[in-house]
Amino acid sequence: MNLQESYLYFILLASLLPAVIIFFIPEQRHRLRVFVNMAGTTIKLVLVFVLMAGVRQGKVYESRITLLPDMDLVLHADALSLLFIGLSAVLWFLTTLYAIGYLENSPHRSRFFGFFSLCVSSTVGVALSGNLVTFVIFYEALTLSTYPLVVHRGTPEAMKAGATYLAYTLGGGAVLLVAVVWLRILAGPLDFQTGGMLGDLVQTYPLELRCIFVLLIGALGVKAALVPLHGWLPKAMVAPAPVSALLHAVAVVKAGAFGIVRVLYDVYGVDPAAQLGVSTGLAVLAAVTILWGSLRALAQDELKKRLAYSTVSQVSYIILGAAILGPVATIGGLVHLVHQGLMKITLFFCAGNYAETLGVHHIHGMDGAGRRMPLTTGAFTLGALGMIGVPPLAGFVSKWYLGIGGLRAGQEWVVAVLVASSVLNACYFLPILYRAWFREQAAAWPEEHAGSRFEAHWMLLTPPLVTAALCIAAGVCAGSDWSPLEWVKMITEREYAPR
Amino acid sequence: MNAVWIYLCTGAGLIALGVLALVREPHFFRKVLAFNITGSGIFLLLVAAASRVSDGPPDPVPHAMVLTGIVVSVSATAVGLALAKKYHHLTGHTALPGEEDEE
Amino acid sequence: MMASPEAWLVLCPLAAAALAFLWRSRGAFIGIVSALINGALVAWLIALMRTEGVRRIEIGGWSAPLGIEFYADGLSPWMLMLAAILGVATAVYARGYFKDPGSWFWPIWLMLAAAINALFLTRDIFNAYVCLELLGLSSVALIALSGNPDALAAALRYFFVSMLGSLFYLLGVSLLYSAHATVDIDRLRSLVSETPATLAAAAFMTVGLLLKTALFPLHFWLPPAHANAPAPVSALLSGLVVKASLYLLLRLWFEVFPGAIFASVAPLFGLLGAAAVVWGGIQALLQERVKLVVAYSTVVQVGYFFLLFPLAAHPLTAELARQGVIYLLLAHAIAKSAAFMAAGNFIRVVGSDRLEDMKGAGTALPVSMFSLGLAGISLMGLPPSAGFIGKWKLFSASLTAGQWWWTVVLAAGGLLSAAYFFRILSPALAEPSRLGAKIPRTMKWTPMALALAGVLLGFLAPQLLEIFEIGAPLRPAAAMEGGP
């Protein structure tokens, strides 16, 4: 194993090893646990940058382990996987910081942070998977490592949400396995390949391949919360705020969306997918999800629930962009993978701060929150405006490329969907901002925690401020060399390069 | 009808009787007896098989098997009776719960 | 003969059993030492077979049919390995579980170990009968170990079922001997044809062995027997003993009976297996006692094993199916033992076997909780675990053979397992309780080690399957037309 290969394992181990160690750290050894956690996150960040620099120069990192004579475990870092890993590494760092502050003095922290790191390891594994089999392995590991986080509080409500979560995701996992085995029999080793790996099979097995595509999307759509498979996501809101943040911005939902992108581009490929006609169906499903999620979000009074339905809607932007199958739309979809992550995690961090510092869980209780917590509310505002697509924030860039992409691909209806969704976004975000900034505080905060130098604990305050700043940076500096947009353009060039 | 056939038919009859009793009779003691009877039936079949070589001395292997089989069934009987006795001692029942207890 | 591990594999546990019987106060020590020696012997055997291939040893210089012959192709060390791993784990766990080091557990268990080793090494269907009987009687004694009425009733029920099964099997043996004058598997293989005697023998032996293997609908005795035994015994019964009769059944159907009968019976086996998966899964969902849930899960797993028959009947998928089932066998043995041991820890701490009393047990016993979860992953067939490798192969086999309905059964079985494991795990994870009982360290870590092994074995498939394929065991007679 050379150094380049070992980087891949180091990246996995940077979160896996802390997970194993943390399980054995006694509950009261707070400092040791924080040290192990932060060491892991920092090392991972550094490693990701090293890898990114390599991939930029056109290097490809790959490592194989034989699992069965006809089945390899492949770790593979290309530009697309690094997009996802980069996002997860940055947000893992911030979320860990946030979680340490959020869970101060609560029980079972070793269990929590152990599974938290496991969850991130699985996500990185999903991103690094070089073939569908490896993908399945990490995808299931992600399901299992997230469950203890969802039920962390151990209340009956949490247990119920956990049961729903498992029912959806394990069901999806079973379907995924069947689809992958079927495809494996038809197509041989399932290594991801830029431009697809099916070759002539499209002519030989058109019907089978369509069925497999439907199965794959059905399975991955559970995690990506495609309507009508999204039911678990709003329920999973009972989890502690950092878990929701991670679930929505990085881990579970994104793993589903990332899987769909992989299937579309690196298993089926752009042209075969268009030939089979499967991408149009997917685009329509994504559009329906975008609108339905936004509509449902309007009806929620609980802040986290509204954010959850907003996720349902926003994640499908990624899928919509991918399914339109034009280079510009692809850029819009993929860049939203990062942008949505930054914006949504900001919103969840802030929601957690309101709940933790003021005891506010519902939108009707947010009157005057802006004056009490100006920094948090400022960050929240940036996230919300970004979601609506106000320039020059990150969300604007995604929507711009999506819209242009739709037009270029001759699918004008996409623009209509985007406009409608943006209006709906404004309808469910602006009232919150109005209440927070312009209404007078109606009653005393339900559970106010004072006694800090800032409006909230600094560990709770820094992460949303940083991510909000990143939301601006991603929009304003979209043209710079290291922006997500440039990175995504590089991926798209490789994907659509003539072969 | 020669001696072999008598052995065979008796053996088959004993087996059928034994299996029927083993399934039908709830009482432990009868069940233990039943499998002993079934065992004897099978041993008769084996003994009959020893004479399959028409002339010359009978095949010794089946006899060895029957001897082994008898040893096995004696020990099995002992285990069964010991268990049944203990169970009767503890609960006063002589049949398994769920099956008819005739006493 | 002195230099052959086969003889020692039988002699060593037998001698240890006698020793443990005579010197009861040191039973635990003798048991653990014997288990370790057993493990070393199996490793020795595997090392020898990797260079020599199939081994055939005549005990005492007498050749078959009068003497006893030991034979080992790939399947034998596979099963012996499984028995050895479980042997060591059970011994270590039982050391903590039975507070009295002079428990009767030790001599009886060592007897069982000798019987099962002999069974996996014999090539003679009559010797197999003797081993099977010895195995059955020691299992009965182990089930009855706790001495309470429930356990005694379960032991008696198992005793009668086991007797009936063995007698049916013996009847088949005597029919085969009357027809062909031999009890050696290889000789029988070349002699049998579709005569009425063979058909009758096949029917009797199959029913007898199915009873002992607890394939649906002959599984009725298994849940009470496995649920009422002490935890280490349940682990052994579910992990190992059920597989002994299955082993014999596989040997008979794949290596003795003619291919034509095999092909016509295979779909029936598959159907019963599928029924077992569904019925066992539903029953497991309805149980209110932890150990009953785990026991019904064994009924389900036995069903999986029988999917081998229809899939092996198809020439394209025979190898996939064989390797898949053999891997599932390994995965199940290890994971199920771990599950029973972890459940035993919960019961020890909670003081009850009811699911509703398990609340908070996970907080009191995080390690056992984690072991149960890991065992569940392997039993559900989730990656990356040994169970996943097995299921993957079976999935591939059924789709390649175009028999997609087995895929549905497998997927449904996996989801059902997830559901009933969740029923145990979820109350245990729920609100923390004040359970403070301590359990010995050996009891805590043994299931963990087993469960971890169950997951890690998923990564060793190529190396392990190489051992299994020595001498190409379990080839249906039809595929071997023309004789060896």
Image: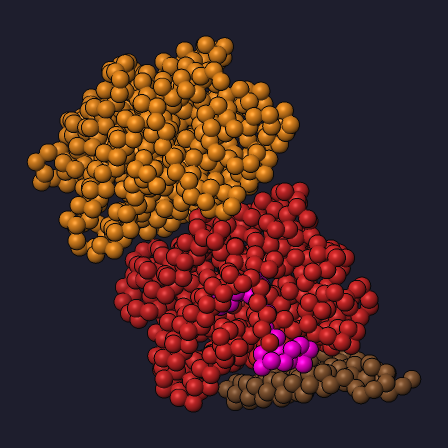
Residue B85 appears at what percent x and percent y?
Answer: 55, 89
Chain identifier, colour orange: A
Q: Which of the 4 image quadrants contains residue A236?
A: top left
- What is the span of residues highlighted in magenta in the rendered image? C59-83
Above or below, B90 relative to C268:
below
Q: Position of residue C320 (x, y in %)?
A: 59, 49
Up-down relation of residue A46 to residue C316 (above or below) = above
Q: Position of residue A322 (x, y in %)?
A: 45, 22
Q: Is residue A69 left or right of residue A26?
A: right
In the rendering, at what x and y percent does residue A350 appear? Answer: 23, 32
Q: Residue at x 46, y 62 (%)?
A: C334
Q: Is residue C10 left or right of residue A161?
A: right
Q: Quarter of the image holding residue C404?
A: top right
**According to the colouring, which chain is brown?**
B
Q: Can residue C71 be found in the magenta stretch?
A: yes
Residue drawn at x 58%, y 23% as measured from the top left: A276
Looking at the image, the residue that sits furthest to the right is B1
Identify the colour of chain C in the image: red
Report whether residue A129 is seen: yes
Q: Going by the image, does C170 lie left or right of C354? A: right
The C terminus of chain C - image quarter: bottom right
Image position of C208 with respect to B53: above or below:
above
